[in-house]
Amino acid sequence: MATLVTGGAGYIGSVVVDDLIDTGSEVVVLDDLSRGHRHAVNERATFYEGGMGDRELVRRICDEKGVEAAMHFSAYTYVGESVEKPSIYYQNNTVATLNLLDELIANNVKKFVFSSTAATYGEPQQIPIPEDHPQNPENPYGWSKLFVERILKDFDHAYGLKFVALRYFNACGATALRTENHDPETHLIPLVLDTAAGRRSHIAVFGSDYPTPDGTAIRDYIHVSDQSRAHLLAAGHLTNGGESECINLGNGQGFSVLEVIEAARQVTCREIPVVMEGRRAGDPSRLVGDSAKARKVLGWDPQMTSLEQIISSAWRWYEKDPRERSAGSG
């Protein structure tokens, strides 16, 4: 029996595929490659190119591979783009996911791990953010994920679908096999390392007057290997008969933008020029998740928690041959 991984050619999905295969699992990857990379898919996984909302294709995969569980990573994830193009976010992140779920239920696949997001919370009312914090997204991206959480709860009630929705904070870092490569790149750590490597003239810091110790925004960074481990634990939770859950996935501690930049200077031994700019609309001063539930329910214990560990894992890829770095990007 196989695990279906949608979006397994992307950054987080490709790391999870590697880890699943290392445990001896049979893995099937479904990805349309619109934002993923074919070379990032583990060669021991079976690969199907296509959309998650293609019910005929999903039906064929279930028939051919005997799918018993699914992990769902396929999504558009740019907040700004979601504001400019909300239709494609609702079509891809919500409608196509509904089609996927309908076909999985039709094929008696009732274990589902979902990549949700802390963007479902909106402006935080307390820090750290617990799972029962009010959910009021500030952009279509967050809403597109929250709608799926609602669908999953209704599918549990109506069809017996058991799920774990993991609400991501800031994924980062790299493994021995995979690193991140987004186009366009919007994540802070790769932008900082691009600057250290001379690919950018400077790193822009948006806002220096937040009510934080150094005036810059604070975020919760989780290493992608710890993130992957949580997905495997979530799958195990469901296999062992666990109930459906929505769970934060973060480090449980926050680091400011300037702290990230200074840690990168220490790791790379490079100058990293900074240009201070005004705040971006809608950027909260702090986003830090309460990870107690992940530890209690899943037995999850993040291992790569320091900025130095996270940044060092990513910087190693900058020291490799560019062709090797490209081959590992997801």
Image: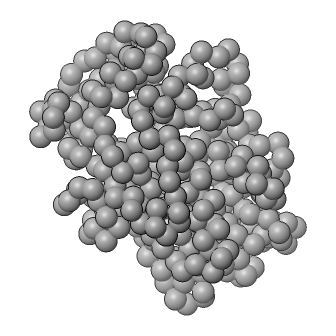
Is 89 located above or below residue 309 in the figure? below
Is 311 located above or below residue 52 in the figure? above
Q: 16 or 78: which is nearer to us?
A: 16
Q: 66 or 257: which is nearer to us?
A: 257
Side (left or right) of 55 relative to 187:
right
| Whole-percent x, y for residue 33 in the image | 67, 44
**Res. 189 image quadrant:** top left
Please identify the quadrant where the C terminus is shown: top right
| Whole-percent x, y for residue 187 in the image | 42, 35
| Residue 188 visible in image | yes
| Residue 50 visible in image | no
**Res. 221 image quadrant:** top left
Q: 327 or 262: which is nearer to us?
A: 262
For image coordinates 23% across by 55% down, the residue present is 127
| Whole-percent x, y for residue 198 in the image | 46, 10
Q: What residue occupies the far bottom of the structure in this picture? A: 158
The total number of labels drawn is 0
For image coordinates 72% across by 54% down, the residue present is 20
For image coordinates 69% across by 34% down, the residue present is 177
Please identify the quadrant where the N terminus is shown: bottom right
Side (left or right) of 103 relative to 183:
right
Side (left or right) of 129 relative to 25:
left
| Whole-percent x, y for residue 67 in the image | 78, 69
Q: What residue occupies the far right of the structure in this picture? A: 64
**Res. 322 image quadrant:** top right
For image coordinates 43% across by 10% down, the residue present is 269
The colour scheme is: one colour
